[in-house]
Image (cartoon, helix red, strand yellow):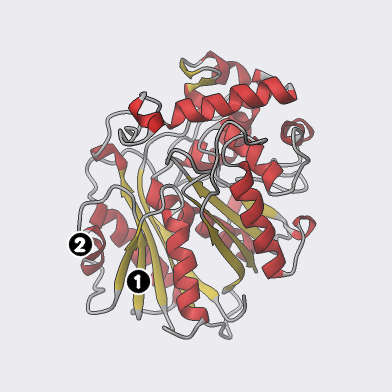
């Protein structure tokens, strides 16, 4: 992909925010993104949200003065925000619009008291299996097949808590130990509470346009969106592996790079097992060896290929519709050299990966992998 750049990004802070409305969160993210981009208007908007009420996008945007332009709302589970980014970038690439806003928004804590309720029309949902249970089954299978230890699973949360402590917008900012992670209450064996992301309220936004003579702009070298293939017990890999592998492979090819060219990643770590499996699917480690990246420090700040320097979903929080654009904002700040104490030195190429799932019988509702270059 050529001819698309991120002009500006913005986010609200992340956390349980009962005093904030979805519109007020969006207002903060959008105004920051517009100011960062150096513009006060856009030609069209794509909005990613999962559980917003009808009219959520228009309600949020009119408070920021954005009316009378096409506004399209998309839902793709956890990948809703990056789906909005993908469609916005396509709109610029094809010349349909010049300046496009991608917005992700979610106020989950006003909708759910605890875990997101499973869809009763699906086999898993009808049997009471929420997403923590599905990821726990993946973790149990992975442990049995590859011998990863419970301490290695916990190490994902420990690493990301160290990163999140450096992120002033993150929901969880305390550093954790392996003992604290394993000692937190069991949610779905073998995943304890601190191995699960928190429901969160937030918004994130990006303004996209054609390349211009502005050194802070970040180029979108590629963006690929796929939905999952049919998936059942006969599949060789745990849930979510193949959709990420195939999407990433296409994104690397489109960008003309290999995984070794990437300086940092923001990935979908809704649960600790998710980051381990995803790093393998992205090509950072052979299948079954993702935990070794944690043992060696490769994916920590200061390592050769940091993963989730923002703290990821585990530390930053997971407001579904906003997550993908929050990942995009982090990579943008990193490639500009504006990430402060969590800056990855010399970062030139970063990758965003978001996988959303929950529908029975397919390997994920959808995944987006985007390659960004500073």
The residue that label 2 is drawn on is: 59
Quadrant for the N terminus in the image: bottom right
In the picture, the disc for residue 254 is: none
In the picture, the disc for residue 45 is: 1
- The residue nearer to you, when weighing 11 against 253, is 253
Residue 128 picture location, percent across and down: 36, 24
Q: Callout 1: few (<14), some (14-19), or many (20+) C-alpha neighbours within 10 Å?
A: many
Give the mark, 1 or 2, whose residue is nearer the N terminus. 1
Let me know if residue 356 appears in the view.
yes
Residue drawn at x 52%, y 48% as measured from the top left:
355
Residue drawn at x 78%, y 48% as measured from the top left:
304
Left or right position of 368 against 141:
left
Q: How far is mark 1 from mark 2, CA to CA?
A: 13 Å
Residue 371 picture location, percent across and down: 63, 63
- The residue nearer to you, when weighing 160 against 79, is 79
Q: Secondary structure at mark 2?
A: helix
Left or right position of 42 against 305:
left
Tell me whether the residue at label 1 lies in contact with that at label 2, contact meaning CB atoms closer than 8 angstroms. Answer: no
Q: For residue 333, what is the image quadrant?
A: bottom right
- The residue nearer to you, when weighing 340 against 20, is 20
Residue 61 picture location, percent across and down: 26, 66
Q: Is residue 95 above or below residue 66?
A: below
Q: How many marks?
A: 2
Residue 169 picture location, percent across and down: 44, 47
Q: Secondary structure at mark 1?
A: strand
């Amino acid at each position: 992909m050529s001819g698309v750049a991120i002009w500006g990004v913005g986010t609200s802070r992340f956390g349980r925010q009962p005093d904030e409305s979805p519109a007020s969160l969006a207002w903060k993210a959008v105004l920051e993104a517009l100011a960062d981009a150096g513009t006060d208007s856009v030609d069209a908007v794509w909005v990613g949200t999962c559980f917003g009420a009808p009219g959520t996008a228009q309600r949020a945007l009119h408070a920021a003065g954005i009316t009378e332009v096409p506004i399209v709302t998309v839902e793709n589970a956890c990948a809703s925000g990056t789906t909005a980014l993908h469609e916005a970038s396509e709109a610029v690439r094809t010349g349909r619009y010049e300046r496009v806003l991608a917005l992700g928004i979610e106020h989950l804590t006003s909708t759910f008291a605890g875990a997101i309720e499973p869809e009763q029309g699906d086999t898993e949902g009808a049997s009471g299996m929420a997403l923590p249970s599905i990821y726990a089954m993946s973790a149990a299978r992975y442990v049995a097949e590859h011998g990863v230890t419970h301490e290695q699973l916990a190490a994902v949360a420990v690493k990301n808590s160290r990163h999140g402590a450096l992120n002033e917008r993150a929901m969880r900012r305390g550093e954790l130990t392996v003992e604290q992670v394993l000692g937190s209450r069991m949610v779905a064996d073998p995943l304890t509470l601190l191995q699960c992301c928190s429901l969160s309220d937030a918004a994130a936004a990006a303004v996209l346009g054609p390349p211009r003579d502005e050194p802070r702009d970040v180029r979108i070298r590629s963006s690929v969106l796929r939905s999952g293939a049919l998936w059942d017990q006969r599949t060789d890999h745990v849930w979510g592996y193949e959709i990420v592998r195939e999407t990433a492979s296409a994104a690397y090819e489109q960008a003309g790079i290999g995984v070794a060219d990437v300086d940092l990643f923001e990935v979908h770590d809704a649960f600790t097992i998710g980051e381990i499996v995803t790093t393998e699917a992205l090509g950072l480690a052979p299948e079954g060896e993702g935990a070794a990246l944690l043992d060696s420090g490769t994916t920590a700040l200061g390592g050769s290929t940091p993963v989730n320097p923002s703290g990821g979903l585990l530390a930053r929080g997971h407001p579904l519709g906003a997550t993908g654009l929050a990942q995009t904002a982090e990579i943008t700040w990193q490639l500009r050299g504006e990430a402060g104490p969590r800056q990855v030195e010399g970062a030139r190429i970063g990758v965003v990966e978001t996988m959303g799932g929950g529908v029975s019988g397919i390997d994920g509702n959808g995944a987006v992998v985007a390659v960004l270059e500073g």
